[in-house]
Image (tube, helix red, strand yellow):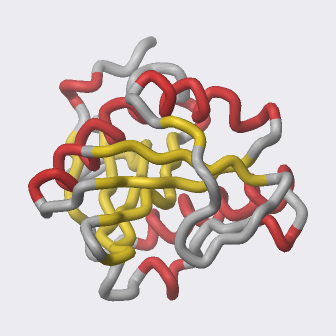
């Protein structure tokens, strides 16, 4: 059954729900399985709780659980300064990939970035085939390839992208 993005509840999150930590641990495991250690730039829970990070979660209703339901997506913005933010921690649960969750989270975060006054948003993602669906999503939303930004350096296992807001 396809996920209907209008059923999604996307919220700015304080990361206190233990389901988020389990979801992000799975994210880190995937990143470590697809990239060499020095090329894994995903943030752990301690780094996600820093004041320069805003973190959103996406939930679907689940009849078997109390609200908010089932965690199916995440995304974050990291303040870089001078009107520039970095998109971080974009993840969609494997069971709902390709069903619009990532698109809905990305649209929400792009809107929030505009509301927060950012003029540019950049991201780092892997360059391996595992990341191709993410590359296609970002390209559809106007991201273009760019040079490493912020504290990143050149890395053959990373793809850097940016767009004006």
Q: Is residue 8 left or right of residue 34?
A: left
Q: Nearer the viewer, residue 87 or 29?
A: 87
The quarter of the rendered structure image containing the N terminus is top left
Instruction: Please report the residue visible at 43 percent of the width from the left and 62 percent of the height from the top.
Output: 86
Quarter of the picture containing the C terminus is top left
Tell me the quarter of the picture where residue 103 sits. Answer: top left
What residue sits 57% from the left and 31% below the top? Answer: 95
Q: Position of residue 69 (x, y in %)?
A: 30, 46
Please name whichever residue, 111 or 72, is drawn nearer the observer in this view of the structure: 111
Q: Residue at x 21, y 28 (%)?
A: 7
Question: Is residue 155 positioned above or below 38 on the image?
Answer: above
Spot occupied by residue 110 in the image (x, y as percentages of width and height): 26, 45
Examine the rendered structure and indicate whether residue 54 appears above or below residue 29: below
Residue closer to the observer: 29 or 71: 29
Q: How many marks?
A: 0
- Give coordinates of residue 67: x percent, y percent: 21, 51
């Amino acid at each position: 059954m396809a996920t209907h993005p209008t059923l999604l509840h996307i919220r700015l999150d304080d990361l206190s729900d233990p389901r988020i930590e389990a979801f992000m641990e799975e994210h880190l495991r995937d990143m470590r399985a697809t990239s060499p250690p020095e090329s894994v730039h995903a943030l752990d829970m301690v780094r996600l709780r820093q004041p320069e990070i805003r973190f959103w979660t996406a939930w679907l209703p689940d009849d078997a659980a109390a609200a908010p339901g089932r965690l199916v997506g995440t995304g974050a913005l990291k303040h870089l300064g001078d009107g520039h933010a970095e998109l971080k921690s974009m993840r969609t649960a494997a069971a709902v990939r390709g069903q619009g969750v990532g698109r809905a989270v990305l649209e929400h975060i792009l809107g929030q970035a505009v509301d927060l006054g950012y003029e540019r948003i950049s991201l780092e993602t892997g360059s391996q085939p595992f990341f191709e669906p993410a590359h296609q999503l970002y390209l559809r939303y106007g991201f273009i390839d760019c040079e490493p930004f912020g504290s990143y350096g050149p890395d053959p296992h990373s793809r850097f992208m940016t767009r004006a807001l």
